[in-house]
Image: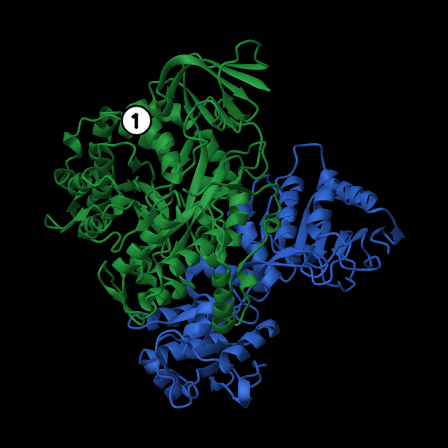
Amino acid sequence: MAVAWIGNRETLVERAAAHAAALLGSSRCPVFSLDTDIHGTRAAIALAERVGAAYDHADGAAVSREAALFTDKGAMTVAPGEARRRADVVVVVGELPQIHHQFVGELSATVPDLSTPDLSARNQREIFLIGSNEMSAPRLSNGRIATLLSCGEASLGATLAALRAQWRGRQTSRPVSNFDDFAKALEAAHFPVFLFSGDATEGLALEMLQGLVTDLNRKSRASGLHLPASENGWGSALASTWMTGFPLRTGFARGFPEFDPWRYDVARMIAAGEADLHLRISSSIVQPQKKRNRMALIALAKTQEPVAGAAVTIAIGEAGVDHQAVVYSSRTGSLRSVDARAASELPSAATVIRLVASHVSAEAALPC
Amino acid sequence: MLTKIAGGDIIDPVNGRLGKGDLWISDDKIVAAPAAGAADRTIDAAGCIVMAGAIDIHSHIGGGNVNTARLLLPEQHAAHQARPATTPLSNAGWSTFQTGCLYAKMGFTTVVEPAMSPGAALHTHLELADIPIIDKATLAILGNDDFLLSMIRDDASSTMIEDYVAWTVASTRALGVKVINAGAAAAFKENVRTFSLDDVVPFYGVSSRKIVKTLQAAVDSLGVPHPLHVHCNNLGSPGSADTAAATIAAAEGLPLHLAHLQFYGYGTEGKRRFSSAAARLAELVNATPEVTIDIGQVMFGQTVTVSSDVMRQFSARGSAQPKKSVIHDGDGNGGGIVPYSYGKDFYGTMQWAIGLELFLLIDDPWRVFFTTDHPNGAPFTVYPALFELLMSREARTEMMAGLSPPAMALSTLAAIDREYTFEEIAIMTRAAPARLLGLTDRGHLGAGATADIAVYRRDQNIAKMLGQAAYVFKDGDLVVQDGEITHYRWGKALRLNPSPDKAMLRRLEDYHQQRYGLSLDWFDFPDTAIAREQPFGEVACRT
């Protein structure tokens, strides 16, 4: 099976890596977009420093919103295991990514075993959904339906603002549906948990949610469970933070890391024609991309054929499928080692990136 | 390769070697002077002092909470950023890479991250593995976790508790055990806002004292070299000296280490009801030989407090500067990140003075350890300035002149003449930490020791001298020359490896399946997950 191409021509991985390195070496503004595991991220950031690249997650907007909650505001959060064992009221905030729906279903099917909350006669958690009827809501166990907290057509941020205002006894222009049920549940709750993600939730809405959680903690306990828009994205954000001091959307254009969530928004850089080389690292199948300007593309992807329009394509394995990997797990709220489910000879992203880096210059070995 | 460090002033209290002489290294070990043969390399150490590489027993350098602090404070980066250097990512301020470089430049070769949440062990070790040059180690946090509290509540046997502690230490690759405000994080989840040594955790009916005593006994019985590392209750509160005194008394003949005692050195005298209780605590430490402490010295300026004492951090949110914080309820402790700036006002001055009083009033340098509780009291980069304050009364006097007079009036610091000698510094930062952690291969310069060596060029300016080592060897490899990093090497994380009991493993598997809906392997990892050659170095338990 072919694993590397220069243009549409099959070649040796070594030769493709050398060509990729040459492109990186001659690029004036290389950008990386990542959708990879922790070691793939580490290798990519080390390479980014060497070639002066900026890097971001492949779906950078959502991860950036989540990072901004921490960089700009701070948060009160809870571990997923603790939420499972302690939350007597669960509030789903807006639309959660599909990957988290199973966990919400699990929450609806189980009861907390820590502390001794009164779970009412039904012996189950109370579950609310903040948003609108049109949302794709997680399926609950036994056909249960979450109680909707909504302000009609209002945005999620406006609904959260109204909810927070009503909770503090203030007037709102439009009441939140089922507020009395919500207030009653909170009054009785020992540890309500709000499930949130940056996937479809704007930054101001995330801040408003944290304001509500802070208000609740004046007299009782409550917290938020961060369910990342992308597990790979959040894992990359964590690795970037320990390696550079900054989350994603960091660039090495001046030889040292600079964090600028607008300037180093890789999608924006590509759209604006600032980038002249795009290194895309994704173990999932990549869709053909419309050719932009004269920007060259280096694609590291799980593929059996060259990626359309790519100057270089190198096939990589999928983390946790083709090779052992370390990934972020929203189920544990931390990093997790995963074995290969169907081990193959496809190299990991980290292996290929290191190979490319080895051709960039003859300086000391990269640290990752 | 045979290396001779020639003509330096050797300071090696463990082997009683004090004075001018040569030190020989063969590959990664210190060796006796060879009877014949010439060195392959000679380092001229004339005018220098030669000590073992320093060991920091309590510095928050990696793991979930530290990384959250980085995430919370991208603006801190500029303050940490060094000028561009030749080693990769070493100018990435506030990063793992810079951490290793900055420590090595000061002659530190081993650093302990003292607070690893067991559930975040892999994350912690991945960060530690990205800290170049130095060796690392970490302590696993217990004492707020449901499994342990339930066992204590249910009167589990001491053997079962030891099996659980052994499993935790082994699976997390820890060098010891830490308890942080025992029971308080669990109580905080039940909406308790203050918690003392004899308070009881709701739901479990177990007191903080009982948790500490249970873990102290388990750690001792398992032969873990480092005594239970205790972060007491009521950190930072006026009157917390009473809590520290009660905890010292609770040692009851078994080894116990109290972390960052400065943060408990607070009395309630004066019109602000905030005063120094350092003299009282120092007297208690002096009279209690089974107790060791580290200081957690405060130095002035911006920092960020990072602690798994989530209850305390929640209460400190109002003082956040800048005004943002993270409070995380974890599976056990969780943590809190609250940025803070220590000013030269009454309170800042008092905290600064209390730390120094403790350093200077505790007699035995084998039982007092040099820390700022990085970054809680100050970043570790202030160490050179702190050495100067300990070694020079004149430097202290000069500093005191610019501080709060009302605070200094409530402190005994101005009346203390003691100045640490280089020999005492070598004990406090080398020999004693190695002994406390059970690291027999380091902390001294005897034949057979690991060749972790720091060479400092003598200078009237102590901070300059100890801030930029002339030479640093790690495992015999010359990694620092004239205060600059020459190249990276990858140290190990030092760990204990007690054998887990099979029955306990089965019990834990059932527990995780039932309570978390996950198998135990979600919380464990193979060494290969670290993706470095030999990421761990094994340290033996006491037999």
Q: Quadrant of residue A267?
A: bottom right
Identify the image quadrant of the N terminus of chain B: top right
Residue B65, percent from left and from top: 43, 54
Identify whether A78 is placed above or below A271. Answer: below
Identify the image quadrant of the C terminus of chain B: top left
Name the residue nearer the viewer: B10 or B358: B10
Residue B459, percent from left and from top: 36, 18
Chain letter, disc 1 residue: B
The answer to whether residue A99 is seen in the rendering is yes
What coloring was used for the rendering? by chain
Q: How many marks?
A: 1
Identify whether A219 is placed above or below A136. Answer: above
Task: Report the side of A170 relative to A41 (left or right).
Answer: left
Tell me what hue chain B is rendered in: green
The answer to whether residue A260 is seen in the rendering is no
- Find disc 1 in the rendering and name its residue: B424
Residue B82, percent from left and from top: 49, 35
Name the residue nearer the viewer: A16 or A88: A88
Name the residue nearer the viewer: B114 or B484: B114
Chain letter, blue in picture: A
Task: Give the amino acid at mark 1.
Answer: Glu
Task: Report the side of A153 relative to A353 (left or right).
Answer: left
| Residue in the picture at 42% in, 42% down | B112
Identify whether A171 is placed above or below B286. Answer: below
Task: Report the side of B248 relative to B458 (left or right).
Answer: left
Identify whether A329 is placed above or below A354. Answer: below
